[in-house]
Amino acid sequence: MLNNIPNGAESLVYSLIASGVDTCFANPGTSEMHFVAALDRIPGIRCVLGLQENIVTGMADGYYRIAEKPACTLLHCGPGLANGIANLHNARRARSGIVNIVGDHATYHRALDAPLTSDIDAIARTVSDWVRSSARAADVGLDAATAVQVAGQTGGGIATLVLPSDTSWDAGGGVADRLPTLEATPIDPFAVETAARCLRDHGSETLILVGARANMAKALELAHRVARHDGADVLSEYVCARMERGRGRPQIRRVPYVNDAAIKALSRYRRIILVGSRPPVAFFAYPGQAGFQAPEDTVFHTLCRPEQNSVAALTMLADATGAPPVEIPDPGPRPDIVSGPPSQEGLARTLAAVMPDNAIISDESVSYGRDFHAFTHAAPAHDWLHLTGGAIGDGLPVATGAAVAAGGARRVIGLQADGSAMYSVQSLWTQARERLPVTTVILSNRRYNILLGEYRSVGAVPGQTAMNMLDLGNPVIDWPKLAESMGVEAAQATTLERCADLMQQSFKSSAPFLIELVI
Amino acid sequence: MLNNIPNGAESLVYSLIASGVDTCFANPGTSEMHFVAALDRIPGIRCVLGLQENIVTGMADGYYRIAEKPACTLLHCGPGLANGIANLHNARRARSGIVNIVGDHATYHRALDAPLTSDIDAIARTVSDWVRSSARAADVGLDAATAVQVAGQTGGGIATLVLPSDTSWDAGGGVADRLPTLEATPIDPFAVETAARCLRDHGSETLILVGARANMAKALELAHRVARHDGADVLSEYVCARMERGRGRPQIRRVPYVNDAAIKALSRYRRIILVGSRPPVAFFAYPGQAGFQAPEDTVFHTLCRPEQNSVAALTMLADATGAPPVEIPDPGPRPDIVSGPPSQEGLARTLAAVMPDNAIISDESVSYGRDFHAFTHAAPAHDWLHLTGGAIGDGLPVATGAAVAAGGARRVIGLQADGSAMYSVQSLWTQARERLPVTTVILSNRRYNILLGEYRSVGAVPGQTAMNMLDLGNPVIDWPKLAESMGVEAAQATTLERCADLMQQSFKSSAPFLIELVI
């Protein structure tokens, strides 16, 4: 800062802080050095390094889901952004709010097509609600405030601000104040009245389908109350960015992942009230199967869209139907630790048995964990975060970012398929560096098991060439060694009681721990 | 295959094989299962699994640089492609030929916006010369042949074929024959005459700047011969996709990386003949420095563009100038192994001392290795591959793909900065799985050293926040453990003689090996 006039990078930092951003997940490069220097000089933003950009963006996703406010990322040029796109895709599907700061060549250097030059805008637009490239230092502050406004809007948003290096180093940066929060459209009373009439007249054939922030406890309670009053059911979408669940919260089942099962589950309803959700569709198409999972003649009522305030909507609906408050059903006794070889149900029960209060579950268990919810509801209240966009490799970074957001005060437990874990295994290093209380359980089956299932449903027995692409057993990945190489203590378990022991031990420490559970 | 009529996926495999593709670097997902099944049923394509897509695309880049023909990749949907974009960016800058096969939702499923849906075309176009999405099974074969034609053209190309799953599983696939090779524009005799006149009239103030395939031995010999005749100089671009060098080949210096040094090196020339190269520009802009590195009044002559036949062009130029064949200068005695603590020169000399005949060097040494060329030319003939696009994380996968291309017959040596290695560390697992003869030397300085240099040049001493983003020492990555966890034998060296010992040991085995050289 020269005579109290900030350069562009400094105005960026001041403006981010003024807008409430206090965390930056970063993997910087040459073109961001002035931004790094500004972050260094101006206190107020915690910088967390990820060793690859998909770690960085995945952490920002996990952070938002718990903190409920955006962090920023610091990414280096087009390829750095590209490396982080998969987890930005997941974040977009989770409706998380993230401000990406992508360093770029100086404005006048772009035309020279230096080796790192690429079409950043095109890459950014595939995942962003808003993309802007600052034109000069004087604009950077307001651009940053606008980016935070987009990311911080009700319902989240991905804002990508491209920062040419000269807009960083040039003098004359303008600092911007926080901009007003962009609120979603208020709830439409007509939509409430329509939904109320649907419940009154057709309650027993109506499904209330919750999604997005309607998976938070308050909305779930209201949905449960309304449904109970008129004999309707409540289901959640299969993937939930964050579901508040466990003891004291209503137990909500999800639309099944498997298409046949989903079609069957939805076949009994004639009407679906969408509360932050969308009409359910299959994850993938299969020959001869419907992609749209509800019966063709289903009547859909949109009570509120994903970005709208579902608590307000459901409160209005409860009033309109006259549904009285109800007690949350007791989920039954807390399960005991299961012993013996791992099973899906056994692991879920064991987790429920040992999980500390207010834990955060980062679930990228893929096929193994599809029924975990069924056996974990009697655990203490907790948050459950899913892989939302199907781009594998978000479990470890989301766990890491969630732990950062919780400020070390909550235990994060990662339920992590081994194949997916290898996508973003570098997350473990950040967990060690920041001493985050994350316990990762690697579900080690040494294959892409979901794909083996899909392969068999193609009607074929995998031969050597197929197994070369689906099997992870040659060589076997030594997970404890891999974790320890990045500073995370680890151990292997082949029984559930050993896994329970290791989990409980890990909960006593504030450091990360990894358990390879051989399944 | 039903009654000998292939489905779309089978026609794809048959057509790829007919077009000469025999290697597929893969990371499949659900939407590619029919393609995987077809690869399994139809022999002829070797499938190599990468545990993350940037490994897959980086391997395809390394493969092309050595095999001089395209492999295909198998990627899963938009996020899978996005994960591989950074190394496709590098491949594009290397002018490698690659056929990407990107699985997508069924054509009729896209509109449902299922979780994995994204704008594949937009992502693909940022790195591709050609993008097509097959519309029906009958088109797949010809689409694939066209993709190989684009990728296999003289001068390479990135072709991305999007394969909706129904075009894979539907019957009625048409098998296409190989299409004719697309040849580059023939050399312009007028360009040859202009270059010859330039050399004749202004030889001593002329630079012959070689790039792309003009870094192969035959072109380098011709460039050397022509330059010698008229007193001109030869330099190579700083980054070379592949340079054939070592004993028996002319020793060509590169335009320096550091901008000041490059400007100085180019300041003595008034004329530059471009042979497969482009006018040199700075990697990054710096305040107050020129981005264009040659003097403003430099006269450029384009003898041939990067995709054109530089051997033909230089042969014509040699004829036009009457430059007689010359002996390749002797590079002097082969260096001895250096002992003691590592230094840049010492490591380069040691490498030159132990390198086996016909080795392949994959160089992602970043700042540490900028002068390696100066001390390695008296080694036996070898190929040297650089990081071409500045997107770090290509060294390990390029080494892996190069080893696949060489069919185990050549030793690959990776000179690998630690920070960059962590971007694509999963490559080690593929090296172990395929038992590839790759010796990786991790240059372990436990920091992003290039960035610390850049940071200091911003004029600041890094404080804690900056070091949180630039230092990799907390925790220290245990490289031998990390490699062993993925099935690669490894050891640490703190002296050059120990490093030499380990390298020589590793050369005796056909398996991969990793050396952490603490620098």
Image (tube, coloured by chain):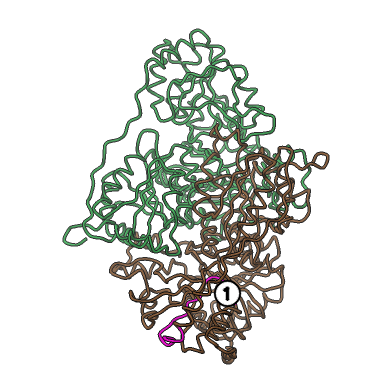
Chain colours: A green, B brown
Residue B492 at least partly seen:
yes
Between A177 and A50, the one lying in front of the other is A177
Dividing the picture into quadrants, the one containing residue A318 is: top left
Chain for numbered disc 1: B
| Magenta stretch secondary structure, dominant | helix
Q: Position of residue A44 (x, y in %)?
A: 29, 51
- Disc 1 marks which amino acid? Trp
The residue most toward the top is A201
Disc 1: which residue: B384
**For residue B408, above or below residue A79:** below
- In the image, taking residue B58 as reference, residue B470 lies left or right, namely left
Dividing the picture into quadrants, the one containing residue B214 is: bottom right
Dividing the picture into quadrants, the one containing residue A187 is: top left
- The residue depicted at 49 percent of the width and 50 percent of the height is A509
Answer few, some or many: residues within 10 Å of disc 1's Cα (few below 14, many 20 plus, some between 14 and 19). many
The residue most toward the left is A3
Q: Position of residue B287 (x, y in %)?
A: 29, 67
Between B477 and B301, the one lying in front of the other is B301
Q: Position of residue A101 (x, y in %)?
A: 37, 51
- The residue depicted at 52 percent of the width and 67 percent of the height is B387
Start and end of the magenta stretch?
B199-216
Q: Position of residue A132 (x, y in %)?
A: 35, 47
